[in-house]
Image: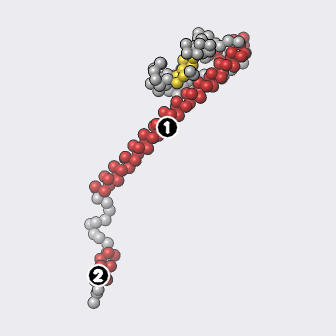
Amino acid sequence: MKTENQTTTQKRRRPRRGMSGLTLIEILVVVTILGIIASIVGIQVAGQLEEAQVDTAKVQISNISDGLELYRVKFNRYPSSAEGLNALTSPPKGRKPIMEKIPKDPWDNDYIYVSPGQQNTSKFDLQSKGPDAVADTDDDITNW
C-alpha cells in the first residue's frame, strides 16, 4: 500500500507533459527586462563618450596653447590671426616646427584661433565649437 507521501513524491518525479519550456509571456517579460537594462547602459555609455570628448578638447586646447607659448618664446610674438595655428607647423625662417600637426577637435572641426584675443587681450583666444559645431554657444570649449 502506498502512503500519501510516496504518491506525492512520485508525482513530482514524473516529467510533466505539455508543460516544458517557457510561455510566450515569460519570454516577452525577459526580453523587455533585457531591453530596459540595455537602454540604461546605453545612456550611461553615451554620457561618458560626450564627457570624454569634452575632456579631449580641453587637453588639445592646452597642448596647442603650450605650443603657442613656445612660439612666443622663440619669435617674441604670437602668430597673427592671419597666420593662424599653421604657424606652429610651418614656422618662419626655416626653423623646426613646434608641432607636427594641429589636431581637429573631437567633433572633427578646426579650432578657432584669434590673436590678440578678445577674451585674453594680452594673449590669444583658442576655441572649439563643441558638440553642436556652432561657435559662441554654451557648449564651446575655450582657453578662457
- Against 13, residue 79 (above or below) is above
At 46% from the left edge and 36% from the top edge, which residue is drawn? 47
Task: Say few, some or many: other residues with alpha carbon within 10 Å of mark 2 (under 14 / 14 to 19 / 20 or more).
Answer: few
Q: Amino acid at mark 2?
A: Thr
- Against 82, residue 46 (above or below) is below
Q: Position of residue 144 (x, y in %)?
A: 56, 21
Disc 1: which residue: 48
Front one among 93 and 129: 129
Left or right relative to 104: residue 74: right
At 52% from the left edge and 30% from the top edge, which residue is drawn? 54
Please identify the quadrant where the N terminus is shown.
bottom left
Badge 1 element: helix
* Farthest residue, direction bottom: 1
Left or right relative to 113: residue 28: left
Asked whether the viewer can see residue 124, the reply is: yes
Q: Position of residue 121 (x, y in %)?
A: 59, 13
Badge 2 element: helix
Asked whether the viewer can see residue 84, the reply is: no
Q: Position of residue 142 (x, y in %)?
A: 54, 22
Q: Where residue 40 is drawn, which disc sits there?
A: none
Left or right relative to 70: residue 23: left
Disc 2: which residue: 7
**In whole angstroms, how far apart are the C-alphas of marks 1 and 2?**
60 Å
Write down the quadrant of residue 41 in the picture. top left
